[in-house]
Amino acid sequence: MAETEPRPHPGNTPAVVSPDEATGTDCCCLVKAEDDVFKEPMKKRRRAGPGQRFRALQSAEQCALKEYEKLESRTRRVLSNTYQKLLQCVFLDDSIPNGVKYLINRLLALIEKPSLDPIYIGLFGSTGAGKSSLINAIIQQAMFLPVSGESICTSCIVQVRSGCCEQYEAKIHLLSDQEWKEELKNLTKLLHSAEEPGGEEVDPWDGDGAVEEAIWKLRMVYGTGAERKNYEELLRAKPKGKIPTSRVITLKAEEAGELSIKLDPYIRTQRRDGDGESAETRIWPLVKHVEVTLPKSSLIPEGVVLVDIPGTGDFNSKRDEMWKKTIDKCSAIWVISDIERVSGGRAHEDLLNESIKACQRGFCRDVALVVTKTDKLHLPEYLRERKLGNQAVQSQREAVLERNEMIKQQRSRNLKEKLKRKLPADSKALETSDLVYTVSAQEYWQKSLLTEEETEIPKLREYIRKRLLDEKRRMVTKYVTEAFGLLLLTDSFNSTENLPNEHLHLSSLWRFVEERTELLERAMEQCFAHIERPLQEGVRVARTSYRRILGACLVRSKGNQGFHQTLKAVCLKNGIYASRTLARIDLNQAVTQPIYDQIDPVFGGIFRAGKPADSALMPHIDAFKHSLQEKMAEIGIRSGWKCDSYKKRFLIQEISAILGGLEGYILRRKRRIYESVSSSVQNDLKPYYEEAAQITGKKACERMKDVLRRGVERQVAEGMFERAQERMQHQFQQLKNGITEKVKGSIATMLTLVSSQGDGLYKELADVSNEHREMEKLHRSLREVAENAQLRRGMQDFLRMSPSKASQNLTASWAQHGK
């Protein structure tokens, strides 16, 4: 398909030309011809869509990514060949020596290891903030996901990723039968408590939204009048929509627009009356989450998942649990706020706070603010309020660009200050150069006011590509290194390097391991001890402020009108209420916030990766690793091992693999530790939530408040905050014990294997010398790939410069090298 002429950009700005278009060559030409990973067989493709010209990412990131993928693929092939050879050796034997079992199991584990855990980038924002429009622009499909207009989009999570197939596909996951029954019970309790004799009169459509939400859901599933039926009656009622027994609805289409039409009824619904809705739309309250898979595309490289995350969670326990887990598994979170709401408002601040918590308890490393709809600007009003000196603004375009820059500076400064208060000073989230993006999805399509680059959609795509490349580089480096170590050992058992004095004395080495493990335990204790003082101070502050905090949560300026149903919902869900219309309410989190305010910077410091510090856990584990590796090298020299001994190199590589695997374990435990304070308080207050949830009749709201106040007072007097402190400290102790057990168990297995030079192993295994040599080449290639990526990035940066600037840089470079 021929490229069309680029449209002229406003303001006579020259069109941005990619480095590959400028040179007329593929940037991947830096790869050797015999290693060219871009020579793929021609496939018959359907008609190119609007985003087809972006299909090949002509960038340094993509070229490097291809090289890393090729390294990984070749490594898997070498491992598979080695695995098959070992299996053939033992195929007819009744018993397999333990050493060979170890090798076979380790090879199989590496072969089956996933290429890359999905990289989740969360778009976190309230309804109407522009999340769906932004995703549509990033994937180059203008109306793919429904956007909020007169209809309200659902509060379910929508995941969008690229796949390997040629079709568009969506999987709509529904609540299980039991999960829906649980929600149905809570919805009917919420509705019928208002109908008790002597109960408070409430207009269901004029409250805080809890009753309205319940009525809406029941009408959608069971039809008009469902809100008047009790729980048992609704259990016997037949839903209006068809619910598959698998609880999964799969939709497929050849084109994006076709799938969008099919998907629309499941994730968009009308606000009030359910009459006349389609059977598909009536399924909406049962939708748990939606997974959308696009055909292979460089716009969202395979391995990256864009997640549309509602701002508040959900009344349903399972959906709310998924909401929290999804936030925590995101490696980056973009807080989405439109230009008219970014300058304030509780909802915006709540989103930022929740995102920062994800940095503490989850996998998140980057938090950024994405300001949407930046093309919206009333020029006369802007000029009247403008306070930026004497420089004249001549047009709407100049005003938009000026305001965007001003917002970037202001909000970047504010966000950085907020992050500094909550995170360690050397946190990666503080090192990023872009904390705020100003985007316009509408202008990305229309280009009537801004250029494509000025909409910053391409900038977000570049971020995605870089994030994927960083993760792929880390994963492949670790994978190839681990595979190389395993091939070293496998080949060593057929080596002639079996010197008489090379026997490894297990008892002395194991004593060294135990000594170092004890040192690691003491280091971990000292590391975790840093949390004790902030915990104590947090408890002290919480004891003095809980009445004020609880009062602020329980009092509404407009009185109890409608609020008693929201409070009922809070109690039904053990102190937490989430809806599409209100800010999230979490009483447990609120009363423990003073504790978190004290521990946050220290907690983040314990689990940070980077600069060594007494309070950081990973540097202590790294020091333990290096001490073991040095001991292995020392033993090798003393035992007469050759300087490149297979066994010594294997030991060093395998220690890195064993201790490297601890990182995932620690991250999984981190969330449980962080949430232990609020979950402890929730557990203590649960009997009072249950008591308050049963209250009906006259003055129900005040009576519920009294129960909650009395319960909190009693639990605080009995040591509620102190128990929360003890629970967090106990969780840290469990983490320390878990690390110690995993280290000892894994190293013991490894040492037993390598200390038995031929004992318990076949003296002659299959010849894997060819596989070893190929693995050695791949291991050396890691450095070449990194160097190629750096060279390509420098070339692209050079080609993006203006001719005059490029000439100056080139002249300076020649002068520096004496040319």
Image: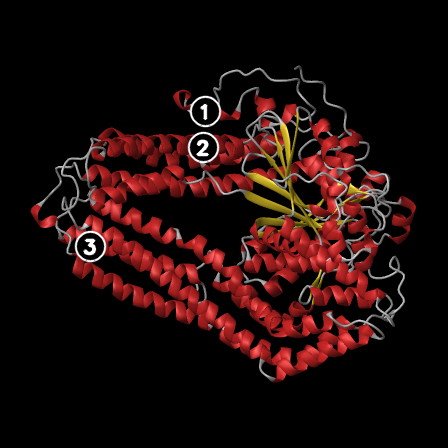
**Quadrant assignment, res 75:** top left
Judge by depth and name the residue closer to the eye, 354 or 192.
192
Q: Is residue 246 visible?
A: yes
Judge by depth and name the residue closer to the eye, 519 or 418.
519
Disc 1 to disc 3, C-alpha distance? 42 Å
Judge by depth and name the residue closer to the eye, 806 or 573.
573
Q: Amino acid at mark 1?
A: Val
The residue indicated by pointer 2 is 69
- Is 741 rendered above or below residue 474? below
In primary-sequence order, the first of circles 3 and 2 is 2
Q: Position of residue 710 (x, y in %)?
A: 70, 81
Residue in the picture at 77% in, 40% down: 281
Closer to viewer: mark 1 or mark 3: 1
In primary-sequence order, the first of circles 1 and 2 is 1
Quarter in which the C terminus is drawn: top left
Which label belongs to residue 37?
Answer: 1
Q: Position of residue 67 (x, y in %)?
A: 45, 31
The residue indicated by pointer 3 is 634
In primary-sequence order, the first of circles 1 and 3 is 1
Q: Amino acid at mark 2?
A: Glu
